[in-house]
């Protein structure tokens, strides 16, 4: 009897649960509300989805709506006693002055090229992990690949600066092997900026590719080999078409992220590699009523990236549909 009482711990003698949740569950109003809320699976889903939906609306859509609103103002912040009016002049400034077009299209072209480079560099890594590494070691290797991405963007960008500098590891190794007589000026070029952006976005390409390759059944390639297909033919006709979804997802993520980089182009790029994010930042750094112009330019950059992404997704969808016929 004594052991039985000890096992029961602090449960009251009358069987009532005196904890907070016990008292809450015993409250009639609480039971009524929970009974109504969980009466159907649809209501349960709405309750579970309410917080994520609220988070997206307040933390993502909210700032975008505010940015669009500010872009239509003639001045921001609004001075006390001044009547606020809306205008399209901020957008007209972009389309009316060709000086802003060059960094805009440079940003889109850089993002497209860097996305392609990231795909070419990470696809073999994802293929090796998914097809040639045992399941026991995959998680360990993925963890080792993830660890550098726990560090912030600025720190990793400085690491690239140390590697590519005139006294960095790359130049020292090339000089040690006698391949060069003097350091190669890698820094503050499109090459150094590309290396930094590819390094920073590699994970967003790697994971979708790895997921697509891991789900690919071995029997498909085995059947193609039995029919006489070589390694290149199997990759071109079997592996690549069946991983187009992963390629599409990875390229979309990397492209959209690349169009928004600011710190990396500032630290690794030079005057000839100015991107549109730097142009936008200039409007927010000056004193005066330049915030609406900066918001308008940011909206244009966002719209341009979304349009190109939609076109790319449409092409990839048509390509996938063609491969399934």
Image (cartoon, rainbow, N blue to C red):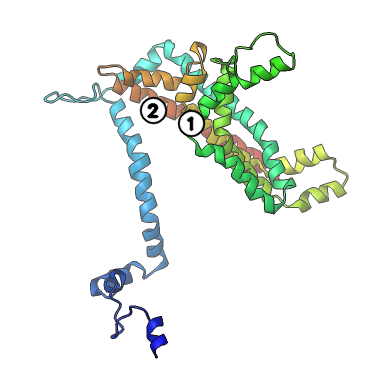
Q: At x 16% / y 24%, what residue is drawn?
A: 79
- Residue 215: x, y in percent? 67, 51
**Left or right: where 98 falls relative to 111:** left
Q: Alpha-carbon neighbours of circle 1 within 10 Å: few (<14), some, or many (≥20)? A: some
**Residue under circle 2?**
299
Q: At x 74% / y 46%, what residue is drawn?
A: 132
- Residue 234: x, y in percent? 79, 42
| Quarter of the image where the N terminus is located | bottom left
Q: At x 30% / y 34%, what residue is drawn?
A: 66
- Of marks 1 and 2, the one in the foreground: 1
- Residue 7: x, y in percent? 41, 81
Q: Earlier in the sequence, mark 1 or mark 2?
A: 1
**Left or right: where 28 falls relative to 259:** left
Q: Among all residues in the image, which is located at the extreme front?
A: 2
Res. 311 image quadrant = top right
Question: Could you say which is closer to the camera, residue 78 or residue 89?
Answer: 78
Q: Is residue 181 visible?
A: yes
- Residue 190: x, y in percent? 57, 17
| Quarter of the image where the C terminus is located | top right
Q: Among all residues in the image, which is located at the extreme bottom?
A: 1
**Residue under circle 1?**
153
**Left or right: where 225 falls relative to 139:** right
Spatial CA distance of label 1 from label 2 is: 24 Å
């Amino acid at each position: 009897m004594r052991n039985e009482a000890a096992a029961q711990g602090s449960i009251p003698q009358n069987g009532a649960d005196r904890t907070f949740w016990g008292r809450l569950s015993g409250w009639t109003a609480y039971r009524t509300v929970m009974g109504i809320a969980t009466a159907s699976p649809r209501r349960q889903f709405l309750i579970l989805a309410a917080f994520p939906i609220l988070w997206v609306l307040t933390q993502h859509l909210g700032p975008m709506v505010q940015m669009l609103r500010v872009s239509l103002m003639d001045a921001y912040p609004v001075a006390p006693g001044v009547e606020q009016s809306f205008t399209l002049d901020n957008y007209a400034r972009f389309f009316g002055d060709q000086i802003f077009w060059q960094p805009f299209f440079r940003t889109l072209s850089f993002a497209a090229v860097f996305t392609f480079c990231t795909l070419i560099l990470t696809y073999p890594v994802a293929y090796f992990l998914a097809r040639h590494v045992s399941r026991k070691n995959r998680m360990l290797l993925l963890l080792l690949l993830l660890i550098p991405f726990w560090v912030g963007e600025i720190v990793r960008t400085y690491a690239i600066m140390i590697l590519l500098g005139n006294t960095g590891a790359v130049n020292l190794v090339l000089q040690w092997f006698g391949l060069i007589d003097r350091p190669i000026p890698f820094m503050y070029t499109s090459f150094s900026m590309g290396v930094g952006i590819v390094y920073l976005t590699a994970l967003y390409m790697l994971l979708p590719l790895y997921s697509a390759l891991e789900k690919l059944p071995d029997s498909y390639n085995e059947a193609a080999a039995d029919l006489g297909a070589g390694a290149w033919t199997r990759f071109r006709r079997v592996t690549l078409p069946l991983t187009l979804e992963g390629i599409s997802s990875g390229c979309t993520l990397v492209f959209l992220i690349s169009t928004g980089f600011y710190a990396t182009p500032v630290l690794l790029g030079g005057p000839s590699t100015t991107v549109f994010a730097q142009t936008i930042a200039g409007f927010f750094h000056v004193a005066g009523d330049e915030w609406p112009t900066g918001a308008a330019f940011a909206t244009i950059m966002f719209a341009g990236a979304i349009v190109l992404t939609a076109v790319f997704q449409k092409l990839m969808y048509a390509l996938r549909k063609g491969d399934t016929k």
